[in-house]
Protein backbone atom coordinates (compact mmCIF):
# COMPACT_ATOMS: atom_id res chain seq x y z
CA UNK A 1 0.00 0.00 0.00
CA UNK A 2 2.83 2.38 0.92
CA UNK A 3 4.50 1.59 -2.40
CA UNK A 4 1.32 2.47 -4.28
CA UNK A 5 1.09 5.78 -2.39
CA UNK A 6 4.70 6.54 -3.26
CA UNK A 7 4.06 5.93 -6.96
CA UNK A 8 0.91 8.04 -6.79
CA UNK A 9 2.79 10.94 -5.18
CA UNK A 10 5.59 10.66 -7.73
CA UNK A 11 3.09 10.80 -10.61
CA UNK A 12 1.34 13.85 -9.12
CA UNK A 13 4.67 15.56 -8.49
CA UNK A 14 5.83 14.96 -12.05
CA UNK A 15 2.47 16.12 -13.44
CA UNK A 16 2.59 19.33 -11.40
CA UNK A 17 6.18 19.93 -12.47
CA UNK A 18 5.24 19.46 -16.13
CA UNK A 19 2.30 21.86 -15.77
CA UNK A 20 4.48 24.44 -14.04
CA UNK A 21 7.14 24.08 -16.72
CA UNK A 22 4.50 24.52 -19.41
CA UNK A 23 3.10 27.60 -17.69
CA UNK A 24 6.61 29.03 -17.36
CA UNK A 25 7.17 28.30 -21.02
CA UNK A 26 3.95 30.09 -21.95
CA UNK A 27 4.83 33.01 -19.73
CA UNK A 28 8.27 33.25 -21.24
CA UNK A 29 6.93 32.84 -24.76
CA UNK A 30 4.37 35.59 -24.42
CA UNK A 31 6.90 37.76 -22.60
CA UNK A 32 9.22 37.25 -25.55
CA UNK A 33 6.46 37.91 -28.09
CA UNK A 34 5.22 41.05 -26.29
CA UNK A 35 7.83 42.27 -23.78
CA UNK A 36 6.17 44.28 -21.05
CA UNK A 37 7.73 47.69 -20.60
CA UNK A 38 8.73 48.66 -17.08
CA UNK A 39 7.95 51.92 -15.35
CA UNK A 40 10.62 54.63 -15.55
CA UNK A 41 11.24 58.27 -14.66
CA UNK A 42 12.96 61.27 -16.25
CA UNK A 43 15.96 62.10 -14.04
CA UNK A 44 17.74 65.20 -15.23
CA UNK A 45 18.56 67.65 -18.01
CA UNK A 46 22.28 68.45 -18.15
CA UNK A 47 24.64 70.48 -20.32
CA UNK A 48 27.53 68.84 -22.16
CA UNK A 49 29.86 70.01 -24.94
CA UNK A 50 27.78 68.31 -27.63
CA UNK A 51 24.61 69.92 -26.30
CA UNK A 52 21.99 69.12 -23.69
CA UNK A 53 21.46 65.53 -22.54
CA UNK A 54 18.27 64.19 -21.02
CA UNK A 55 18.83 61.38 -18.52
CA UNK A 56 16.07 58.81 -18.00
CA UNK A 57 15.80 55.58 -16.05
CA UNK A 58 15.92 52.38 -18.01
CA UNK A 59 12.54 50.87 -18.80
CA UNK A 60 12.65 47.07 -18.75
CA UNK A 61 12.44 45.65 -22.32
CA UNK A 62 12.78 49.10 -23.93
CA UNK A 63 14.84 49.26 -27.11
CA UNK A 64 14.48 53.01 -27.73
CA UNK A 65 13.25 56.25 -26.17
CA UNK A 66 11.46 59.15 -27.84
CA UNK A 67 11.70 62.63 -26.33
CA UNK A 68 9.33 65.45 -27.27
CA UNK A 69 9.69 69.00 -25.93
CA UNK A 70 6.69 71.34 -25.94
CA UNK A 71 6.06 74.86 -24.71
CA UNK A 72 3.32 75.97 -22.33
CA UNK A 73 0.82 76.14 -25.20
CA UNK A 74 1.49 72.51 -26.07
CA UNK A 75 3.25 73.38 -29.33
CA UNK A 76 5.98 70.91 -30.29
CA UNK A 77 9.44 72.51 -30.26
CA UNK A 78 11.72 69.49 -30.60
CA UNK A 79 11.59 65.74 -31.14
CA UNK A 80 14.30 63.06 -31.13
CA UNK A 81 14.79 59.33 -30.60
CA UNK A 82 17.62 57.55 -28.78
CA UNK A 83 18.67 53.94 -28.28
CA UNK A 84 20.05 54.58 -24.79
CA UNK A 85 18.96 56.38 -21.65
CA UNK A 86 21.24 59.37 -22.27
CA UNK A 87 19.23 61.25 -24.89
CA UNK A 88 21.16 63.91 -26.79
CA UNK A 89 18.99 66.95 -27.58
CA UNK A 90 21.22 67.90 -30.48
CA UNK A 91 20.95 71.55 -31.55
CA UNK A 92 17.95 72.15 -29.29
CA UNK A 93 17.55 75.80 -28.35
CA UNK A 94 14.87 77.82 -26.59
CA UNK A 95 14.11 81.36 -25.52
CA UNK A 96 15.20 82.71 -22.16
CA UNK A 97 12.52 82.21 -19.50
CA UNK A 98 10.57 79.69 -21.58
CA UNK A 99 8.74 76.99 -19.60
CA UNK A 100 9.40 73.65 -21.25
CA UNK A 101 7.61 70.34 -20.86
CA UNK A 102 9.53 67.20 -21.75
CA UNK A 103 7.68 63.98 -22.59
CA UNK A 104 9.56 60.69 -22.93
CA UNK A 105 8.12 57.47 -24.32
CA UNK A 106 9.81 54.05 -24.18
CA UNK A 107 9.27 51.54 -27.00
CA UNK A 108 9.74 47.78 -27.05
CA UNK A 109 10.78 45.75 -30.09
CA UNK A 110 7.17 45.53 -31.30
CA UNK A 111 6.66 49.28 -31.19
CA UNK A 112 4.48 49.17 -28.08
CA UNK A 113 4.88 52.40 -26.13
CA UNK A 114 4.91 53.41 -22.48
CA UNK A 115 5.20 56.98 -21.22
CA UNK A 116 7.40 58.05 -18.33
CA UNK A 117 5.64 58.32 -14.99
CA UNK A 118 5.64 62.11 -15.18
CA UNK A 119 6.24 65.02 -17.53
CA UNK A 120 9.56 66.73 -16.80
CA UNK A 121 9.23 70.51 -16.54
CA UNK A 122 12.19 72.81 -17.07
CA UNK A 123 12.68 76.57 -17.05
CA UNK A 124 15.18 77.60 -19.75
CA UNK A 125 17.58 80.03 -18.05
CA UNK A 126 20.15 80.36 -20.80
CA UNK A 127 20.42 83.63 -22.65
CA UNK A 128 18.84 83.88 -26.09
CA UNK A 129 18.91 86.28 -29.02
CA UNK A 130 16.36 89.06 -29.13
CA UNK A 131 16.03 90.70 -32.54
CA UNK A 132 16.18 94.48 -32.71
CA UNK A 133 16.01 95.54 -36.36
CA UNK A 134 14.25 92.68 -38.13
CA UNK A 135 15.64 89.82 -40.22
CA UNK A 136 17.33 91.91 -42.90
CA UNK A 137 20.89 93.19 -42.44
CA UNK A 138 20.98 96.87 -43.34
CA UNK A 139 24.14 98.44 -44.78
CA UNK A 140 23.53 101.55 -42.66
CA UNK A 141 22.91 99.70 -39.39
CA UNK A 142 24.92 96.49 -39.68
CA UNK A 143 23.82 93.50 -37.61
CA UNK A 144 22.39 94.41 -34.19
CA UNK A 145 21.42 91.83 -31.56
CA UNK A 146 20.29 91.92 -27.96
CA UNK A 147 20.94 89.08 -25.52
CA UNK A 148 17.85 88.40 -23.46
CA UNK A 149 18.66 86.97 -20.03
CA UNK A 150 22.35 87.90 -20.17
CA UNK A 151 24.29 87.79 -16.86
CA UNK A 152 27.44 89.78 -16.20
CA UNK A 153 29.36 86.73 -14.97
CA UNK A 154 28.44 84.56 -17.95
CA UNK A 155 30.73 84.01 -20.91
CA UNK A 156 29.25 83.41 -24.34
CA UNK A 157 30.63 83.12 -27.84
CA UNK A 158 28.89 84.46 -30.94
CA UNK A 159 29.51 82.68 -34.24
CA UNK A 160 28.10 83.76 -37.59
CA UNK A 161 27.80 81.03 -40.22
CA UNK A 162 27.28 81.23 -43.98
CA UNK A 163 26.61 77.95 -45.81
CA UNK A 164 27.65 76.11 -42.60
CA UNK A 165 31.05 77.86 -42.52
CA UNK A 166 32.00 80.18 -39.66
CA UNK A 167 32.65 83.65 -41.09
CA UNK A 168 32.75 85.66 -37.88
CA UNK A 169 33.43 84.86 -34.21
CA UNK A 170 33.40 87.03 -31.11
CA UNK A 171 33.51 86.60 -27.32
CA UNK A 172 30.43 88.33 -25.90
CA UNK A 173 31.05 90.85 -23.10
CA UNK A 174 27.73 92.72 -23.17
CA UNK A 175 24.06 92.11 -23.84
CA UNK A 176 24.21 94.45 -26.86
CA UNK A 177 25.93 92.91 -29.86
CA UNK A 178 26.91 94.81 -32.98
CA UNK A 179 28.64 93.45 -36.08
CA UNK A 180 29.68 96.09 -38.67
CA UNK A 181 28.22 95.68 -42.15
CA UNK A 182 31.74 95.61 -43.62
CA UNK A 183 32.29 92.21 -42.00
CA UNK A 184 29.39 90.74 -44.01
CA UNK A 185 28.92 92.79 -47.18
CA UNK A 186 30.39 90.23 -49.57
CA UNK A 187 27.71 87.67 -48.78
CA UNK A 188 24.18 87.15 -50.13
CA UNK A 189 21.50 85.07 -48.50
CA UNK A 190 21.12 83.58 -45.04
CA UNK A 191 23.58 84.23 -42.21
CA UNK A 192 23.01 82.23 -39.04
CA UNK A 193 23.89 83.67 -35.64
CA UNK A 194 24.70 81.00 -33.03
CA UNK A 195 25.27 81.53 -29.32
CA UNK A 196 27.46 79.09 -27.37
CA UNK A 197 28.12 78.69 -23.64
CA UNK A 198 31.57 78.63 -22.10
CA UNK A 199 31.53 74.84 -22.54
CA UNK A 200 30.75 75.32 -26.24
CA UNK A 201 27.13 74.18 -25.89
CA UNK A 202 24.76 75.71 -28.45
CA UNK A 203 21.88 77.56 -26.72
CA UNK A 204 20.39 80.03 -29.21
CA UNK A 205 20.09 80.36 -32.99
CA UNK A 206 18.79 83.22 -35.13
CA UNK A 207 18.78 83.64 -38.92
CA UNK A 208 19.43 86.94 -40.73
CA UNK A 209 19.44 87.82 -44.41
CA UNK A 210 21.70 90.02 -46.48
CA UNK A 211 21.32 91.16 -50.10
CA UNK A 212 18.13 89.10 -50.37
CA UNK A 213 15.01 90.12 -52.38
CA UNK A 214 12.05 91.34 -50.33
CA UNK A 215 8.89 89.26 -50.87
CA UNK A 216 5.76 91.19 -51.84
CA UNK A 217 2.74 91.12 -49.52
CA UNK A 218 0.21 88.31 -49.96
CA UNK A 219 -3.53 88.89 -50.32
CA UNK A 220 -6.21 86.20 -50.00
CA UNK A 221 -9.01 87.18 -52.38
CA UNK A 222 -11.30 84.20 -51.71
CA UNK A 223 -12.51 83.28 -49.19
CA UNK A 224 -12.16 86.64 -47.43
CA UNK A 225 -13.53 85.74 -44.00
CA UNK A 226 -13.45 82.76 -41.66
CA UNK A 227 -15.04 79.61 -43.03
CA UNK A 228 -17.60 77.26 -41.59
CA UNK A 229 -18.16 74.56 -44.14
CA UNK A 230 -18.86 70.90 -44.70
CA UNK A 231 -16.04 68.43 -45.36
CA UNK A 232 -15.26 68.92 -49.03
CA UNK A 233 -12.73 70.42 -51.42
CA UNK A 234 -12.10 74.13 -50.77
CA UNK A 235 -11.00 76.59 -53.46
CA UNK A 236 -8.65 79.47 -52.57
CA UNK A 237 -7.62 82.42 -54.74
CA UNK A 238 -4.74 84.73 -53.85
CA UNK A 239 -2.44 87.45 -55.17
CA UNK A 240 1.00 88.89 -54.38
CA UNK A 241 4.29 87.28 -53.42
CA UNK A 242 6.49 89.28 -55.82
CA UNK A 243 10.10 87.93 -55.93
CA UNK A 244 9.06 84.58 -54.37
CA UNK A 245 10.70 81.47 -55.77
CA UNK A 246 8.35 79.04 -53.98
CA UNK A 247 4.72 79.02 -52.87
CA UNK A 248 3.29 76.76 -50.17
CA UNK A 249 -0.08 75.93 -48.69
CA UNK A 250 0.17 75.28 -44.94
CA UNK A 251 -2.48 73.40 -42.96
CA UNK A 252 -2.78 73.80 -39.20
CA UNK A 253 -5.23 71.46 -37.46
CA UNK A 254 -6.29 72.42 -33.94
CA UNK A 255 -3.25 74.72 -33.75
CA UNK A 256 -0.72 72.10 -34.93
CA UNK A 257 0.94 72.28 -38.35
CA UNK A 258 -0.04 69.14 -40.25
CA UNK A 259 0.93 69.73 -43.89
CA UNK A 260 3.08 71.97 -46.08
CA UNK A 261 2.09 71.55 -49.71
CA UNK A 262 4.26 73.08 -52.43
CA UNK A 263 2.25 74.93 -55.07
CA UNK A 264 3.21 75.52 -58.70
CA UNK A 265 4.72 78.97 -59.32
CA UNK A 266 2.70 81.68 -61.04
CA UNK A 267 -0.68 80.23 -59.98
CA UNK A 268 -3.27 82.27 -58.16
CA UNK A 269 -5.75 79.53 -57.31
CA UNK A 270 -5.48 76.34 -55.29
CA UNK A 271 -8.17 73.76 -54.54
CA UNK A 272 -7.45 71.96 -51.29
CA UNK A 273 -8.54 68.32 -51.60
CA UNK A 274 -10.87 67.19 -48.82
CA UNK A 275 -8.60 64.20 -48.18
CA UNK A 276 -6.24 66.51 -46.25
CA UNK A 277 -9.01 67.36 -43.77
CA UNK A 278 -10.74 65.66 -40.88
CA UNK A 279 -14.37 66.16 -39.98
CA UNK A 280 -15.42 68.46 -37.13
CA UNK A 281 -12.01 70.10 -36.65
CA UNK A 282 -10.73 73.68 -36.41
CA UNK A 283 -8.18 74.70 -39.03
CA UNK A 284 -5.96 77.58 -40.04
CA UNK A 285 -5.12 77.68 -43.76
CA UNK A 286 -2.12 79.71 -44.89
CA UNK A 287 -0.69 80.71 -48.26
CA UNK A 288 3.08 81.28 -48.02
CA UNK A 289 5.36 82.99 -50.55
CA UNK A 290 9.05 82.21 -49.91
CA UNK A 291 12.42 83.00 -51.39
CA UNK A 292 14.38 79.72 -51.58
CA UNK A 293 14.03 78.02 -48.19
CA UNK A 294 14.16 81.27 -46.21
CA UNK A 295 11.00 80.63 -44.23
CA UNK A 296 11.61 83.43 -41.70
CA UNK A 297 11.25 86.15 -44.34
CA UNK A 298 8.43 84.55 -46.30
CA UNK A 299 5.14 86.42 -46.65
CA UNK A 300 2.03 84.68 -45.40
CA UNK A 301 -1.71 85.24 -45.41
CA UNK A 302 -4.24 82.92 -43.83
CA UNK A 303 -7.78 82.27 -42.70
CA UNK A 304 -9.46 80.31 -39.91
CA UNK A 305 -11.97 77.60 -40.70
CA UNK A 306 -14.19 75.01 -39.10
CA UNK A 307 -14.69 71.83 -41.12
CA UNK A 308 -17.94 70.09 -40.29
CA UNK A 309 -19.14 66.62 -41.15
CA UNK A 310 -19.06 65.23 -44.64
CA UNK A 311 -22.31 65.85 -46.52
CA UNK A 312 -24.66 62.99 -47.28
CA UNK A 313 -25.70 62.36 -50.86
CA UNK A 314 -29.29 63.43 -51.39
CA UNK A 315 -31.76 60.53 -51.56
CA UNK A 316 -33.33 59.22 -54.75
CA UNK A 317 -36.82 60.44 -55.59
CA UNK A 318 -39.21 59.23 -58.25
CA UNK A 319 -41.40 61.04 -60.79
CA UNK A 320 -44.60 59.12 -59.93
CA UNK A 321 -46.52 58.02 -56.90
CA UNK A 322 -45.91 54.33 -56.10
CA UNK A 323 -49.10 53.76 -54.03
CA UNK A 324 -51.27 53.50 -57.15
CA UNK A 325 -49.95 53.68 -60.70
CA UNK A 326 -51.18 52.73 -64.17
CA UNK A 327 -49.53 49.76 -65.84
CA UNK A 328 -47.04 50.85 -68.49
CA UNK A 329 -46.11 54.10 -66.74
CA UNK A 330 -42.51 55.14 -67.30
CA UNK A 331 -40.95 56.46 -64.11
CA UNK A 332 -37.76 58.45 -63.76
CA UNK A 333 -35.36 58.50 -60.82
CA UNK A 334 -33.29 61.48 -59.71
CA UNK A 335 -31.29 62.95 -56.84
CA UNK A 336 -30.51 66.58 -56.03
CA UNK A 337 -26.79 65.80 -55.68
CA UNK A 338 -25.01 66.63 -58.95
CA UNK A 339 -22.94 63.82 -60.50
CA UNK A 340 -24.26 61.21 -58.06
CA UNK A 341 -24.77 57.70 -59.48
CA UNK A 342 -28.12 56.04 -58.77
CA UNK A 343 -28.11 52.30 -58.07
CA UNK A 344 -31.28 50.23 -57.80
CA UNK A 345 -32.60 46.72 -57.33
CA UNK A 346 -35.90 45.05 -58.21
CA UNK A 347 -35.52 41.89 -56.11
CA UNK A 348 -35.79 43.39 -52.64
CA UNK A 349 -32.04 43.37 -51.93
CA UNK A 350 -30.09 46.35 -50.63
CA UNK A 351 -28.61 48.36 -53.54
CA UNK A 352 -24.86 48.92 -53.69
CA UNK A 353 -22.17 49.69 -56.29
CA UNK A 354 -22.62 46.22 -57.77
CA UNK A 355 -26.33 46.82 -58.44
CA UNK A 356 -27.94 48.09 -61.64
CA UNK A 357 -27.13 51.70 -62.53
CA UNK A 358 -30.08 53.91 -63.41
CA UNK A 359 -29.72 55.41 -66.90
CA UNK A 360 -33.12 55.42 -68.60
CA UNK A 361 -36.75 55.50 -67.39
CA UNK A 362 -38.13 52.31 -65.88
CA UNK A 363 -41.47 50.98 -67.15
CA UNK A 364 -43.78 49.69 -64.41
CA UNK A 365 -45.83 46.84 -65.89
CA UNK A 366 -46.77 45.06 -62.66
CA UNK A 367 -46.43 45.39 -58.91
CA UNK A 368 -42.74 46.22 -58.41
CA UNK A 369 -40.55 46.62 -55.33
CA UNK A 370 -37.87 49.19 -56.22
CA UNK A 371 -34.99 50.00 -53.87
CA UNK A 372 -32.66 52.91 -54.62
CA UNK A 373 -29.42 54.46 -53.37
CA UNK A 374 -27.37 57.42 -54.61
CA UNK A 375 -23.57 57.39 -54.28
CA UNK A 376 -21.17 60.27 -54.96
CA UNK A 377 -17.54 61.13 -54.32
CA UNK A 378 -16.56 62.85 -51.04
CA UNK A 379 -20.00 62.31 -49.54
CA UNK A 380 -21.67 59.63 -47.48
CA UNK A 381 -23.99 57.37 -49.47
CA UNK A 382 -27.64 58.32 -49.41
CA UNK A 383 -30.07 56.33 -47.36
CA UNK A 384 -31.92 53.55 -49.16
CA UNK A 385 -35.34 54.59 -50.39
CA UNK A 386 -37.92 51.89 -51.07
CA UNK A 387 -40.74 52.40 -53.59
CA UNK A 388 -43.40 49.69 -53.56
CA UNK A 389 -45.25 50.31 -56.83
CA UNK A 390 -48.82 48.98 -56.94
CA UNK A 391 -50.76 48.74 -60.18
CA UNK A 392 -54.19 50.32 -59.72
CA UNK A 393 -56.31 53.47 -59.83
CA UNK A 394 -58.12 55.50 -57.19
CA UNK A 395 -59.50 58.98 -56.65
CA UNK A 396 -56.77 61.34 -55.53
CA UNK A 397 -57.43 62.94 -52.14
CA UNK A 398 -55.50 66.09 -51.16
CA UNK A 399 -55.76 67.97 -47.86
CA UNK A 400 -54.68 71.62 -48.10
CA UNK A 401 -53.57 73.25 -44.85
CA UNK A 402 -52.76 76.94 -45.42
CA UNK A 403 -51.20 78.89 -42.53
CA UNK A 404 -53.43 80.14 -39.71
CA UNK A 405 -50.85 82.68 -38.50
CA UNK A 406 -52.98 85.85 -38.46
CA UNK A 407 -50.33 87.67 -36.43
CA UNK A 408 -47.51 87.07 -38.92
CA UNK A 409 -47.35 90.24 -41.07
CA UNK A 410 -45.45 90.49 -44.34
CA UNK A 411 -43.68 93.36 -46.09
CA UNK A 412 -46.14 96.29 -45.95
CA UNK A 413 -44.52 98.18 -48.84
CA UNK A 414 -45.26 95.27 -51.20
CA UNK A 415 -48.89 95.11 -50.09
CA UNK A 416 -48.51 91.74 -48.32
CA UNK A 417 -50.96 91.50 -45.43
CA UNK A 418 -50.65 88.46 -43.16
CA UNK A 419 -49.39 84.95 -43.79
CA UNK A 420 -52.82 83.52 -42.96
CA UNK A 421 -54.69 85.77 -45.39
CA UNK A 422 -52.27 85.46 -48.33
CA UNK A 423 -51.71 81.70 -48.02
CA UNK A 424 -55.46 81.07 -47.76
CA UNK A 425 -56.00 83.03 -50.97
CA UNK A 426 -53.31 80.93 -52.66
CA UNK A 427 -54.88 77.72 -51.29
CA UNK A 428 -58.30 78.77 -52.62
CA UNK A 429 -56.90 79.06 -56.16
CA UNK A 430 -55.07 75.73 -55.80
CA UNK A 431 -58.24 74.08 -54.50
CA UNK A 432 -60.22 75.31 -57.50
CA UNK A 433 -57.63 74.05 -60.04
CA UNK A 434 -57.36 70.62 -58.41
CA UNK A 435 -61.13 70.17 -58.23
CA UNK A 436 -61.43 71.17 -61.88
CA UNK A 437 -59.12 68.23 -62.59
CA UNK A 438 -61.18 65.72 -60.63
CA UNK A 439 -59.20 65.75 -57.38
CA UNK A 440 -61.03 65.37 -54.07
CA UNK A 441 -59.84 68.36 -52.03
CA UNK A 442 -60.31 69.17 -48.35
CA UNK A 443 -59.13 72.44 -46.82
CA UNK A 444 -58.55 73.34 -43.20
CA UNK A 445 -60.36 76.03 -41.24
CA UNK A 446 -58.07 78.79 -40.01
CA UNK A 447 -59.83 78.81 -36.65
CA UNK A 448 -58.74 75.24 -35.93
CA UNK A 449 -55.32 74.15 -34.67
CA UNK A 450 -52.77 71.81 -36.26
CA UNK A 451 -53.96 68.79 -34.29
CA UNK A 452 -57.44 69.24 -35.76
CA UNK A 453 -56.00 69.65 -39.26
CA UNK A 454 -54.06 66.38 -38.91
CA UNK A 455 -57.05 64.55 -37.48
CA UNK A 456 -59.24 65.67 -40.41
CA UNK A 457 -56.55 64.78 -42.96
CA UNK A 458 -56.16 61.28 -41.53
CA UNK A 459 -59.94 60.82 -41.32
CA UNK A 460 -60.42 61.50 -45.05
CA UNK A 461 -57.38 59.27 -45.82
CA UNK A 462 -55.59 61.95 -47.79
CA UNK A 463 -52.94 60.83 -50.27
CA UNK A 464 -51.15 64.15 -49.73
CA UNK A 465 -51.27 66.54 -46.78
CA UNK A 466 -49.89 69.88 -48.00
CA UNK A 467 -49.23 72.66 -45.48
CA UNK A 468 -48.79 76.03 -47.26
CA UNK A 469 -46.78 78.81 -45.59
CA UNK A 470 -44.58 81.78 -46.38
CA UNK A 471 -41.25 82.36 -44.67
CA UNK A 472 -39.54 85.10 -42.64
CA UNK A 473 -36.05 85.87 -41.38
CA UNK A 474 -34.56 88.06 -38.66
CA UNK A 475 -32.54 90.04 -41.22
CA UNK A 476 -35.52 90.48 -43.58
CA UNK A 477 -33.02 89.93 -46.40
CA UNK A 478 -33.28 86.17 -46.90
CA UNK A 479 -34.98 84.93 -50.07
CA UNK A 480 -35.97 81.66 -51.70
CA UNK A 481 -38.25 78.65 -51.45
CA UNK A 482 -37.91 75.64 -49.18
CA UNK A 483 -40.03 72.61 -48.42
CA UNK A 484 -40.02 70.31 -45.39
CA UNK A 485 -40.53 66.60 -44.95
CA UNK A 486 -39.80 64.47 -41.90
CA UNK A 487 -36.68 62.57 -43.03
CA UNK A 488 -34.86 61.33 -46.17
CA UNK A 489 -36.84 58.07 -46.23
CA UNK A 490 -40.27 59.73 -45.80
CA UNK A 491 -43.07 58.73 -48.16
CA UNK A 492 -43.42 62.43 -48.99
CA UNK A 493 -39.85 62.77 -50.34
CA UNK A 494 -40.72 62.39 -54.03
CA UNK A 495 -43.79 64.62 -54.15
CA UNK A 496 -42.02 67.26 -52.03
CA UNK A 497 -38.95 67.25 -54.29
CA UNK A 498 -41.08 67.47 -57.44
CA UNK A 499 -43.05 70.35 -55.93
CA UNK A 500 -39.84 72.18 -55.05
CA UNK A 501 -38.00 71.56 -58.34
CA UNK A 502 -40.94 72.74 -60.46
CA UNK A 503 -41.76 75.79 -58.35
CA UNK A 504 -38.13 76.91 -58.22
CA UNK A 505 -38.10 76.97 -62.01
CA UNK A 506 -40.46 79.95 -61.99
CA UNK A 507 -38.83 81.67 -59.00
CA UNK A 508 -37.41 85.04 -60.19
CA UNK A 509 -34.08 85.07 -58.29
CA UNK A 510 -32.51 81.77 -59.37
CA UNK A 511 -29.23 83.55 -60.19
CA UNK A 512 -28.48 83.72 -56.45
CA UNK A 513 -27.44 80.22 -55.28
CA UNK A 514 -28.42 81.02 -51.68
CA UNK A 515 -32.09 81.04 -52.70
CA UNK A 516 -31.89 77.40 -53.81
CA UNK A 517 -32.79 76.09 -50.36
CA UNK A 518 -34.26 72.77 -51.44
CA UNK A 519 -35.89 69.98 -49.46
CA UNK A 520 -35.17 70.04 -45.74
CA UNK A 521 -35.73 67.48 -42.99
CA UNK A 522 -37.79 68.44 -39.95
CA UNK A 523 -36.81 65.30 -38.00
CA UNK A 524 -39.99 65.36 -35.95
CA UNK A 525 -40.06 69.12 -35.25
CA UNK A 526 -43.00 69.96 -37.55
CA UNK A 527 -46.40 68.41 -36.87
CA UNK A 528 -47.63 68.58 -40.47
CA UNK A 529 -44.40 67.05 -41.80
CA UNK A 530 -44.09 64.22 -39.30
CA UNK A 531 -44.36 60.58 -40.39
CA UNK A 532 -45.73 59.62 -36.97
CA UNK A 533 -48.70 61.97 -37.40
CA UNK A 534 -49.47 61.86 -41.12
CA UNK A 535 -48.54 59.22 -43.77
CA UNK A 536 -47.56 61.69 -46.51
CA UNK A 537 -47.18 65.20 -45.15
CA UNK A 538 -45.09 68.12 -46.38
CA UNK A 539 -44.84 71.84 -45.56
CA UNK A 540 -43.88 74.32 -48.23
CA UNK A 541 -42.49 77.80 -47.52
CA UNK A 542 -43.36 79.86 -50.61
CA UNK A 543 -40.67 82.56 -50.48
CA UNK A 544 -40.05 85.15 -47.71
CA UNK A 545 -42.99 87.44 -46.99
CA UNK A 546 -40.81 89.96 -45.05
CA UNK A 547 -38.60 90.53 -48.11
CA UNK A 548 -40.02 93.07 -50.57
CA UNK A 549 -39.08 91.21 -53.78
CA UNK A 550 -40.27 87.80 -52.53
CA UNK A 551 -43.52 89.18 -51.10
CA UNK A 552 -44.21 91.06 -54.33
CA UNK A 553 -43.62 87.85 -56.35
CA UNK A 554 -46.14 85.93 -54.23
CA UNK A 555 -48.79 88.65 -54.68
CA UNK A 556 -48.24 89.22 -58.41
CA UNK A 557 -47.79 85.55 -59.40
CA UNK A 558 -50.33 83.91 -57.10
CA UNK A 559 -52.23 82.29 -59.97
CA UNK A 560 -49.02 81.05 -61.65
CA UNK A 561 -47.71 79.65 -58.35
CA UNK A 562 -50.98 77.80 -57.69
CA UNK A 563 -50.98 76.37 -61.22
CA UNK A 564 -47.39 75.22 -60.85
CA UNK A 565 -48.15 73.40 -57.57
CA UNK A 566 -51.29 71.84 -59.04
CA UNK A 567 -49.44 70.56 -62.11
CA UNK A 568 -46.76 68.99 -59.89
CA UNK A 569 -49.42 67.16 -57.88
CA UNK A 570 -51.34 66.00 -60.95
CA UNK A 571 -48.27 64.78 -62.85
CA UNK A 572 -46.98 62.89 -59.79
CA UNK A 573 -50.21 61.10 -58.93
CA UNK A 574 -51.46 60.56 -62.49
Image (cartoon, rainbow, N blue to C red):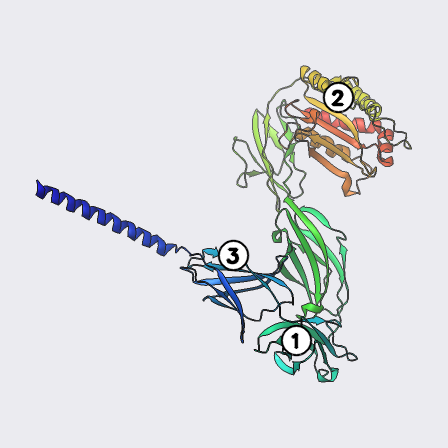
Pick whichever, 245 or 82, lies toward us. 82
Pick whichever, 138 or 290, lies toward us. 138
* Quarter residue 291 falls in: bottom right
Q: Secondary structure at mark 2?
A: strand
Residue located beneath label 1 in the image: 192
Pick whichever, 563 or 552, lies toward us. 552
Query: Would you call the spot at circle 1 few (<14 residues within 10 Å), some (14-19), or many (20 or more)?
Result: many
> In the figure, 261 relative to 193: above or below?
above
In which quadrant of the rendered image does the N terminus lie?
top left
The location of residue 43, given as percent across then percent down, is 49, 63
Cα distance in 3D space between marks 3 and 2: 69 Å
Nearer the observer: mark 3 or 1; the answer is 3
Q: Secondary structure at mark 3?
A: loop
The location of residue 423, given as percent across then percent down, is 81, 25
In which quadrant of the rendered image does the C terminus lie?
top right
Nearer the observer: mark 1 or 2; the answer is 1
* Quarter residue 450 falls in: top right
Cα distance in 3D space between marks 3 and 1: 36 Å
* Quarter residue 403 falls in: top right
Q: Residue at x 78, y 27 (%)?
A: 469
Nearer the observer: mark 3 or 2; the answer is 3
Residue located beneath label 3 in the image: 118
Query: Would you call the spot at circle 2 few (<14 residues within 10 Å), some (14-19), or many (20 or more)?
Result: many
Query: Would you call the spot at circle 3 few (<14 residues within 10 Å), some (14-19), or many (20 or more)?
Result: few
Question: In this view of the protein, can residue 319 be seen by the observer?
Answer: no
Q: Secondary structure at mark 1?
A: strand
Residue located beneath label 2 in the image: 400
The mark that comes first in sequence, 3 or 1, is 3
Q: Is the C-beta separation of discs 3 and 1 under 8 Å? A: no
Amino acid sequence: MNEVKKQYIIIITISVAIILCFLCFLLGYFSYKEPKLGEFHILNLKEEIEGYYLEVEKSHHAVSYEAIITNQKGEELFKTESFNTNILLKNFTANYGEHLKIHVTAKNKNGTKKEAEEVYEYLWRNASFKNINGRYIDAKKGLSLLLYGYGQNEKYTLKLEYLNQVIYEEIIKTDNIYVPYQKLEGYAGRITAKLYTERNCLISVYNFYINTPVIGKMNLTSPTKSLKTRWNDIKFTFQGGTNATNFYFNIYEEGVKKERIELPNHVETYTLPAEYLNEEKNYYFEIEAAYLDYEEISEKVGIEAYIGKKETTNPVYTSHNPSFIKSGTKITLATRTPEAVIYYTLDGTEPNESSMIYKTPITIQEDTLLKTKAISNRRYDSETNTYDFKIGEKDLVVYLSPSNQSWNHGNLESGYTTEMQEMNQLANILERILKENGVIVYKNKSSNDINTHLKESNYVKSDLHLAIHSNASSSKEARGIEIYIDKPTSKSLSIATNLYQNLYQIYPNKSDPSTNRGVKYANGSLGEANDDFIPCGTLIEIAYHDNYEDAKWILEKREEIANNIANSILSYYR
